[in-house]
Amino acid sequence: MSVLKDKILINTGADTKFAKMKALLEPKGAIVYNLPMIRTQPAKMDRKQQKILGNITKFDWIIFTSTNAVRYFFYWLDKQNIQYSKVHLNTAAIGRATADELKKYDINVDYIGTAKDSKQFAKDFLNDVTSCGKRILLPVGNLAEKHLYNTLKEVHIIEKITLYNTLEPISMNSEIIDLISREQYDMLLFLSPSAFKNFMAKAPETVSKYALNIASIGSTTTKEINKYGIRPLLTAEHPNIVNLVNSLEEYYIENNKLKTY
């Protein structure tokens, strides 16, 4: 019997993450609720960015930082009637989840970074891809960190395009908020810094924000949580959902926290 049996776990990531979260947690007996604290939508592409995509064959590398970057990249290619199968670029992905998303589009991934964050990925990429002056395309969202771009531009020629915007949710599920207010849950799962910031901004006063049970997907998200003087109960070593689920199991095994309502 899994230590996650009957644990009430609340996903705060985007709706696109919920299906995978359920598929991993429900077979272990967990009760999984969805409280998405971010949503995404296509950004407005100006002529310069449209021209960059139209001239995609001039690049040597394209680096994808997230699954959203992958999805919106192909969304915009489709809008501009560009067939990526005819484009031959070296492709890099930050993390296994991003690489797996690329494979859905039949894209061979030449370099998969295993770093905990984009800052370390940039260092690893420069160490492993030693040639200089390469033209690199970096598709991102509006809230992307600048570490990767700033580090790589010292050695390579970087073009960054903003393909999507990350926004606050329009509303919050009142029944799930009530569970949190009455502390009738086991763990809030935060998958990004923006999800946590939005939760802190939008959660009602009935929620004891500084007494939350939080599981963080990685060090970047935990860094944001720490800015509020809050410590997550656990942080996954590598920022992906599979590692977060493994970390949850390890946490409850180590602490033997069995809670009844």
Image (cartoon, rainbow, N blue to C red):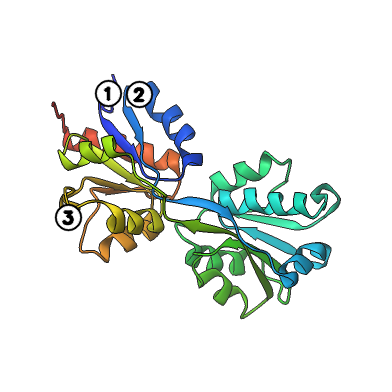
Q: Is residue 217 left or right of residue 133?
A: left
Disc nearer the start of the sequence (2/3) = 2
Instruction: Decide: few, some or many residues near mark 1? Use Cα within 10 Å; few <14, some 14-19, many ≥20.
Output: some
Position in image of residue 195 (x %, y %):
38, 53
In the rendered image, the vertical position of residue 168 relative to residue 97, given as above or below? below
Q: Residue furthest top?
A: 1
Q: Which mark is residue 5?
A: 1
Instruction: Decide: few, some or many residues near mark 3? Use Cα within 10 Å; few <14, some 14-19, many ≥20.
Output: few
What type is the residue that disc 1 sits on? Lys
Q: Residue at x 50, y 71 (%)?
A: 147
Q: Residue at x 37, y 57 (%)?
A: 221
One can see residue 189 in this view: yes
Distance in Å between CA atoms under marks 1 and 2: 6 Å
In contact (CB < 8 Å): disc 1 and disc 2 = yes
Asked which secondary structure carries label 3, the reply is helix
Q: Nearer the viewer, mark 3 or mark 1?
A: 3
In contact (CB < 8 Å): disc 3 and disc 1 = no
Distance in Å between CA atoms under marks 3 and 1: 26 Å
